[in-house]
Amino acid sequence: MISAEKIPNNVNLSGNKRLQRALEHWQPKYIQWWKDMGPQGFQDYHQVYVRTAISVDPEGWAHFEYVKLPEYRWGIFLADPVHDRKIGFGDFFGQPVWQEVPGEFRNQLRRLIVTQGDTEPASVEQQRLLGQRCPSMYDLRNLFQVNVEEGRHLWAMVYLLHSYFGRDGRDEAEELLERQSGNRDKPRILEAFNEPIDNWLDFFMFTMFTDRDGKSQLMSLSESSLDPLARTTKFMLTEEAHHMFVGETGIARILERTCQLMKMAGFSEDVRKVGGIDIPTIQKHLHQWFSLSLDLHGSEVSSNAASYFANGLKGRAKEDTFDEHIVKNACYNMEFFEEGKAVTKEVLMRNAMNEVLRDWYVGDCAAGVVRWNRILESHGMSDRLRLPDRKFHRGIGMYSGFHFDPNGVPLSKEQWEKRSSDWLPSSADTEYLLSIMDKPVYEPGKFANYIAPPRRGINQQPIDFEYVRTER
Ligand code: BYC
């Protein structure tokens, strides 16, 4: 039975028979999907110290308890309404926001919501084997926290589909559980969500860079004229922040440990000899996940993006910080690549909205890399991590048919094939990473050799707290 106890919510679920009926049908399929495709080996006998959102106020969304993963209370929450909210951009600027889906934008909105929704279960699927290679109980708990919240983000999108898109929405909600990350016949919609994540370096890079695309996309959807979409995505952002924390501090702790091991090994030694992760390998994984996440912002010149903006469906991150919100005639200077050369041309700003959001995203990533480099600096290391040029290793958009090195220098196909394993993880790198992660560390307070402990525990608990306990 569907109840507010089982499904914490602030959408008056108990008074909404239509939504209850739709969820009663969908929820058992979701639980089955979670058991089949969620964290493997941690469904039946483990209790995890996780945060559950039970309301949107500061105390409510950070409620901690031990939970068996399939019994997590996936809830439905919208950020508080803004009184008298008006459309903040596009052709309908200044008009009241919509509480229902306008018929003419139904397909576009459904597509945006489905695309967003598809990424959430995809990431859980990508990460389902990681628990068996965890570097500590603290990290294991963080992985599961991220996983259950991605599950909740799927619920958030399914709530919108069930409430505002009738039969089509219900069908889409089912399909969200049918596509599978990496499946040849029914893959997930966006490319980065079909890539395997089988080691923890990939996981931390993913939560740093790909979850940050989640942040930029959710920020732009939280500007939407469809008020329930805006309020749903706004609340999702509070949870997204923790995911990026997991990624950023995960890499920071690996860097910390790498520096310690380098010193122990006498600086010139290969840190792999003492079981650490060398900086070139970290840089390669950064290249991989940053470039895949750049792709997630779509093509540089996009009529889809122009139309989303014009119709008020998807705005810019922090739309209210811009001076002008209609953006009809403004232009964007974009770097094209023609006949082997970079050429700057003006593009109508509305058509460049994917690139505008990508600019915001690159800035946010760059700030994180500066923080990582402070760790290297504090250990007296001369190595630095850096973001590659945005033309590097692109699979979507106008650079995708060409090859560039991490500095953005054009390369022939042959040059690229010769050198790409210097810049992107090779099978030997993956093999090495799996070799140092082959045994999970389940003892409270113990950490794998390649990663330093965190500065503090979760929810003011000690670092050696039993974050995941086993039922016998
Ligand atoms: N892979 O004009 P274009 C998150 C398709 S992450 C494959 O370039 P548009 C999370 C596109 O569909 C955030 N295909 O693209 C993070 C289109 O197809 P059609 C997820 C791609 O529409 C971690 C064609 O190429 N949220 O939350 O402007 C863990 C040309 O379209 C890709 C969203 O994405 C790709 N990467 O923009 C968990 C927000 N990129 O029309 C969760 C919703 C493009 O030719 N989505 N294509 O059939 C959107 O706003 C837009 O769909 C996109 C693409 C920004 C993704």
Image (tube, rainbow, N blue to C red):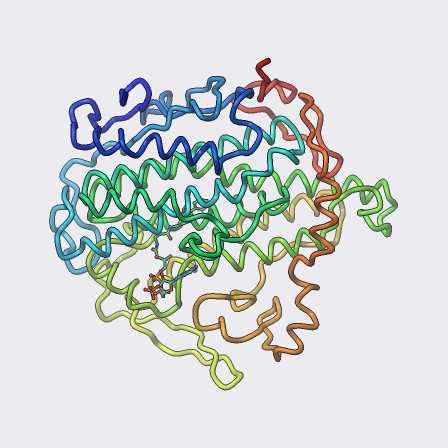
Q: Residue at x 70, y 64 (%)?
A: 422
Closer to the camera in the image, 459 or 150:
150
Closer to the camera in the image, 44 or 195:
44
The percent position of residue 424, horizontal first and vertical second, equals 64, 60
Closer to the camera in the image, 133 or 27:
27
Left or right of 271? Residue 248 is left
The percent position of residue 195, horizontal first and vertical second, equals 54, 53
The percent position of residue 41, horizontal first and vertical second, equals 58, 30
Quadrant of image for the C terminus:
top right
Quadrant in which residue 136 is drawn? top right
Residue located farthest toward the front when viewing the structure as drawn = 185
Numbered marks: total: 0
Quadrant hosting ligand 1: bottom left
Left or right of 303? Residue 140 is right
The percent position of residue 168, horizontal first and vertical second, equals 21, 48
Left or right of 167? Residue 71 is right
Where 39 falls versus 466 (above or below)?
below
Where 471 falls versus 284 (above or below)?
above
Where 300 falls versus 113 (above or below)?
below
Quadrant in which residue 230 is drawn? top left
Residue located farthest toward the bottom when viewing the structure as drawn = 339
Closer to the camera in the image, 255 or 424:
424
Q: Residue at x 11, y 50 (%)?
A: 95
Quadrant of image for the N terminus:
top left
Residue located farthest toward the top when viewing the structure as drawn = 472
Left or right of 364? Residue 257 is right
Q: Residue at x 50, y 79 (%)?
A: 342
